[in-house]
Image: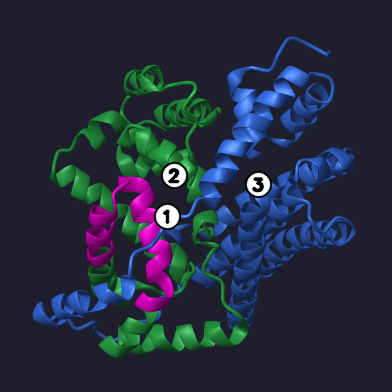
Amino acid sequence: MKLPRSGVAVVRHGDGDAERMDALVRRAQAGDVDAFEGVYRAHAPAVFALCKRMCGDDVEATELVQDAFVRAWERLPGFRGQSTLATWLHRLAVNVVLERWRSKKSDAMRMLDDPEGIALNAVEQRADPDAGMDIAAAMTKLPMGARTVFVLHDIEGYAHDEIATMTGIAAGTSRTQLFRARRALARLLEP
Amino acid sequence: MTQAHLTEERLQGAADGSLDAEQMRAVYGHLSECESCAAEVARLRTVMTRAREANTGAPALDDLWPAIRSRIEESKVVAPKAFAGRASGASARRPWLAIGSTAVAAALLVAAFTQMQRWTPHASEAVLPSQDVAFASAVDSTRIYEDESRRLLNDLEMQKAMMGPSASASLSGDLAIIDRSIAEQKGALARDPHNIALQRLLAAAYREKVDLLRRANNAG
């Protein structure tokens, strides 16, 4: 059983809503696409937020949301309710994002394994200390790998071991990347 | 100041609450006397809090649905009926004797709880606004594990008749340890309802109970 993630806590339901959502999931598992639309409408904003934070781009994030929900439809029969649906969907979306990066052999995957923080050093050196920026803008300045670790750990609530499993980097590297990402963000946020 | 400045690992751990109880106590003792380290921890917490609260500005997501629906129907992917699975393959392979490890884990939980009680004021200080979401998740975890353990206990009633006396006694003993831990943590939470460390310990105790019950059900 997986722990619910901090990042998915935004999707909370009262008892009635939870029962309604359970019913939608059961119908969708039986092949009812209309029911799946209800699942999509309830969870798409949180899944979009996750994708946007990871990739930093609206257009790519909307593409990833589509891929994630098509994948969710395919995998829904395997959802047994051992985690919350939101947790399950977020894990699935994270995998969709990482698979896309792997398939493109993008810099993000190389930057994930950057224990010396070379990419982060470059970001910090480019930053204008007088600029000060909001957190969303600051996060887009991080290298994709460091941003990924930061989002997965500090927003989605994954442990370093889990991040290591998902991304293929060592848990120690994940920890180092996280520390440096936080430091870089703190510097970018300074007025 | 009680010692030299905190290491990077301790500063970061204090900021995200990942330190264990003993480390947390030492770190908070230092932070109460060291303005420099306290400011660093606050700075890191600000980053985490602002990141969690940042608005990502969702576009019109309803507009995406037709394309998703089209892809689903074009691919002719029709989900087969869901099946209810009770035990994972890994847990099903675990031998009955593995239950003993749960008793050890439960005993450790009791020890951790006892340790925490010695410095409850410090634990309460650790609950910060930036941890609200994490606290809600811990509450959510507790509820899920509690529901699951209740369901597994019902299942176990049918298995008990088939257990040998020694296995049954061993299981009852392990359950009693965990239930004692749960009861103590619930009592402590009633006195300090926003203590995230206690909430996490409670969730961990329920998780141990779920693991134990699953192994017992599978062994039966």
- Residue at point 36%, 23% (across, down): A123
Residue A68 percent coordinates (x, y): 27, 64
**Image vertical order of residue A19 relative to residue B162, above or below:** below
Could you say which disc has been placed on residue B130 in the image? Answer: 3
Q: Who is closer to the viewer here, A41 or B202?
A: A41
- Residue at point 77%, 63% (across, down): B179
Residue A159 percent coordinates (x, y): 49, 43
Q: Who is closer to the viewer here, A182 or A166?
A: A182
Q: Who is closer to the viewer here, B54 or B100?
A: B54
Quick check: is A151 in the magenta stretch?
no
Image quadrant holding the N terminus of chain B, namely top right
Taking the image as shown, residue B38 lies to the left or right of residue A67, namely right
Q: Find the magenta span and give its range.
A: A40-67
The chain that appears blue in the image is: B
Number of disc labels: 3
Element assignment for label 1: loop
Could you say which disc has been placed on residue B56 in the image? Answer: 1
- Do marks 3 and 2 share a subunit? no
Mark 2 and mark 1 in contact (Cβ < 8 Å)?
Answer: yes
The quadrant holding residue B26 is: top right
Which chain is mark 3 on? B
Element assignment for label 2: helix
Rendered shade, chain A: green
* Mark 1 or 3, nearer chain start: 1
Q: CA distance from mark 1 to mark 2?
A: 7 Å
